[in-house]
Amino acid sequence: MLARGALIKPWIFTEIKERRHWDISGQERLDIIKDFANFGMEHWGSDDKGLETTRKFLLEWLSFTYRYAPFGILKSPPQRINERLPMYRGRNDIETLLSSPNCQDWVKITEMFLGKVKDDFQFIPKHKANSYS
């Protein structure tokens, strides 16, 4: 179960090591996503194929990470892994974008680091972790 939690909040190991809840900011989360994109381009290359592969894996990961709710705004922390919060407005626009369940918003996040997608690009998550059915 720890690995599933790490999909949603990869800093869980820091929380365990330091025995505290980390109220990570939207900008810090965006920095982690930036690192993911850089590692992907380093591994698969920065050509069209490498960017496509990096974007595919990043989008699949974002389909998990959007479920994280910042510790500072939870009514009853900690959040359980299977708990789905109602739509909420984050403390800033970045937090709100990162918490969006809309696939198109995830594509916007990848465009921040990997460039614009083609007009006919579509993304559909491979798993049902982001659905209520």
Image (cartoon, rainbow, N blue to C red):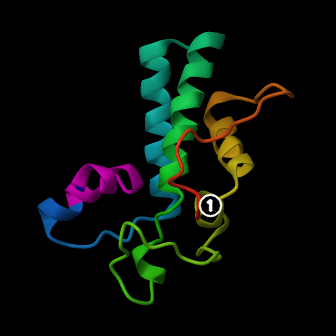
Q: In which quarter of the image is the N terminus?
A: bottom left
Picture residue at 44% right of the left edge, 36% below the top:
35
Q: Quadrant of the C terminus?
A: bottom right
Query: Residue 107: horizontal and vertical position, in percent?
Result: 69, 41
Q: Is residue 69 left or right of residue 88?
A: left
Identity of the residue furthest to the front in this view = 133
Is 12 within the magenta? yes
For the record, the magenta segment spans 2-14
Is 15 within the magenta? no
Q: In this view, does 62 lie to the left or right of 18?
A: right
Kindly identify the amino acid type of the residue bearing the numbered disc 1: Ile
What is the magenta segment's predominant secondary structure? Answer: helix
Picture residue at 26% right of the left edge, 49% below the top:
3
Residue 47 showing in the rendered view:
no
Query: Residue 40: horizontal and vertical position, in percent?
Result: 46, 24
Q: Is residue 39 above or below residue 123?
A: above
Picture residue at 35% right of the left edge, 83% below the top:
77
Sort mark 1 into few (<14), some (14-19) or many (20+) by Cα contacts within 10 Å. Answer: some
Identity of the residue furthest to the right in this view = 119
Task: Choose top left, top right, bottom left or bottom right for residue 114.
Answer: top right
Query: Residue 60: horizontal and vertical position, in percent?
Result: 53, 39
Residue under pointer 1: 94
Q: Is residue 118 left or right of residue 126?
A: right
Element at badge 1? Answer: helix
